[in-house]
Amino acid sequence: MVAQAAWPGPPILCLHEVTEMKGKPDALLLILGLGLVVLGQVYFLRLPQYVWDGVIFCALGALLWVAALRRAQERPTASPSRPAWYRRWLADAAAHPLRTALLGVGVLLVLWAGIGARRADPAADFSPYLRAWALGLLFYILALAPLHPARRTPRPVICGLRHAILRLAPLLLLLLAAFLIRAIALDTIPANFGGDEGTQALEALRLLGPPLGNPFATGWYSVPTLSFVVTGLWMKLFGATVAGARALFALAGTASVLATYLLARRLGGEWVGWGAAVLVAFGHYGLHFSRLASNQIADAFLGPLVLFLLLRGLEGDGRPLDLALAGVVLSLSWYAYFGARLMTVVVGLYLMGRALGGGGAFLARHGRGLVALAVGFALALWPLALYYIAHPADFLSRYNQVSIFASGWLAQEMSLTGKSATALLLQQFWKSISAFNVTPDPTFWYRPGIPLLDPVSGVFFILGLTVAFWRVRRPGGGVLLLWFWAFILLGWTLTENPPSSQRGVGVIPVVAILTAQGITETLQAVRRLAKDRSCFPFHVSLYALLLVLIAIINLRFYFQVYTPRRIYGNPTAEVADVLCDALEGRDEVPPVYFNGAPFMYWDFGAIAFRLRDVAGQDVSVEELPEIDLSGGALFVVLAEKMADLDFLRETFPNGVETPFYSEADGRLLFILYEIQPNRSGGSG
């Protein structure tokens, strides 16, 4: 094997660290495979009527591409065995009584918090139970933290810190960039403040009290209330505004970049780590959900963080602390959006596969850590589990609403279309698996009008998914496929209206990792084909330019193409946003009478949150209530209700009409018909 040259360049871009290669691929196969996948992508975007031709081109190209890499295979190394875990655990408990005490107190605090919250009056203050639960989890983690001997001289610490800062500087710059593109102009991008955003923000304010509401129950759409409590606490710091409600999730979206980098680097090396991080940081799909006041983006943060801690905890002889943290984080995903719960399935199947493949040696080596994981998961979930035991309908409510089986969708579609269940399931599967290259999101949660990946990323995603199948037996290889297919099948295929973007946010990191693997493997192959193998700076530049190109494509689409359309949240969200902008700018707002039923109501979430201090109600000209005009009145007449405007003109003459139009397409949204105050105290 020819020794690789020691190329200059930053340590984060050491291409040879990704994998050890035994030979070079066939140039013709590589070029032909890549060309066919690109051709398939062109068919997806430009010739949708021939979509199956595109599928054939992509499949054939991916097979030729992976065949060109067959000589570049890794050889997994065997892991050493270790003695029985329970003996060491008992010895540690006896040798460290403080740890044992922390563990015992932590467990008792969590148990008390769950039981106390379950028995408390709904109107009681739940802050003691929340504090006890959080403190108990902290004690549990501290009880498993390793002990390190104190250093006698600070010099190694200072040197190590300086080296860490230099190494982390590029990552910190990337995270700063990811945060800025998520946090700037949060109150206006996306232009509409969605109804569901407003409802969740109101729920957060309501739970925050005082007194603090129950954080271990369920609220809007049966979503656990802890995420709303955290949102409310954040708004206490940054204001109960549109930007304040969205700020927490901009931070969570930035954290998903870091979590993805850590996991991807562990699975594929620095190149894959950086590629995946950049794709998550600038991808339009994740960027959009990072700018919403809704908790779906937590799925993209908790998923990779759980797997990073899990894989780190299973290294060598095992790290119980990392596995305990993995259990706690995995349990916290149950308090976020429902999609994050699929990670429990992924982790369970992965551990089952490792146990079956490793036999007794795996359990003997990692038994202590697996118990720590299970205990951490159980402790963090304990209060919510008690609530679900008492309210089993809430546990299955969302499943019953969106499952194609429980909701009756499958039976209804079979009756309406005459198609078989198999045909409908295949149709659902195609919509799900093609979400990144062909099928756009059909919901108003996003509705970009394009697939969830840009065209360049779409090509390398196909290649990365192919190589993941090829290397499924390697350490850590199967977990990516488990993760991806769990979301594709359980999150989309078996639910209504795939690919609904709000249910697929948890798949963003794994798609980014697979795409980064496709890019990295392709550049590896190009390097092995080159006669001059010392041209590392060229390959670094090519890699960087490709990532920059992808970032520019995504940023341009989201900010210059998608945002001006004002599609997000459906047309009612634009009406609410324009109305709130108009009324929030006033010093005083008279009582509002909203004439919009059945198209829209005054309690629409965005209006209810942004105009929560404004007096308003729904009205109909057929049953117009007695209206006190002493302070004036402001009628909101939707465009769909323009026929009612003549009645208002006759009933309340001399009113001032102000029309409001859509900035996107110029259509009339509504008219404000304002009656000036009648100081004599008259009424209409």
Image (tube, rainbow, N blue to C red):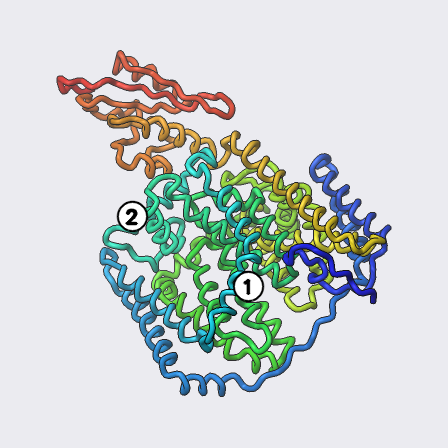
Q: Residue at x 26, y 50 (%)?
A: 209
Q: Position of residue 336 (x, y in %)?
A: 44, 55
Q: Residues within 10 Å of mark 2 (few under 14, many from 20)?
A: some
**Residue 619 is at least partly visible in this image:** yes
Mark sitting earlier along the chain (2/1): 2
| The quarter of the displayed image where residue 111 is located | bottom left
Q: Residues within 10 Å of mark 1 (few under 14, many from 20)?
A: many
Give the CA separation, mark 2 to mark 1.
Answer: 34 Å
- Residue 570 appears left or right of 238: right
Disc 2 residue type (three-letter)? Arg
Mark 1: which amino acid? Leu
Instruction: Please say if 558 is above or below 213.
Output: above
Q: Secondary structure at mark 1?
A: helix
Query: Residue sitting at 39 percent across and 72 percent down?
Result: 140
Tell me if residue 147 can be seen.
no
Q: Position of residue 601 (x, y in %)?
A: 35, 33
* Image position of 537 with respect to 128: above or below: above
Q: 361 or 542: nearer the eye?
A: 542
Residue 547: which disc?
A: none
Foreground: 508 or 667?
508
- Residue furthest out toward the left: 680
Left/right of residue 109 with respect to residue 416 in the rendered view: left
- 414 with respect to 385 (left or right): right
Q: Nearer the viewer, residue 54 or 404?
A: 54
Depth order, front residue of 409/334: 334
Quadrant holding the C terminus = top left
SS under mark 2 = helix
Residue matched to label 2: 206
| Residue that numbered label 1 is attached to | 307
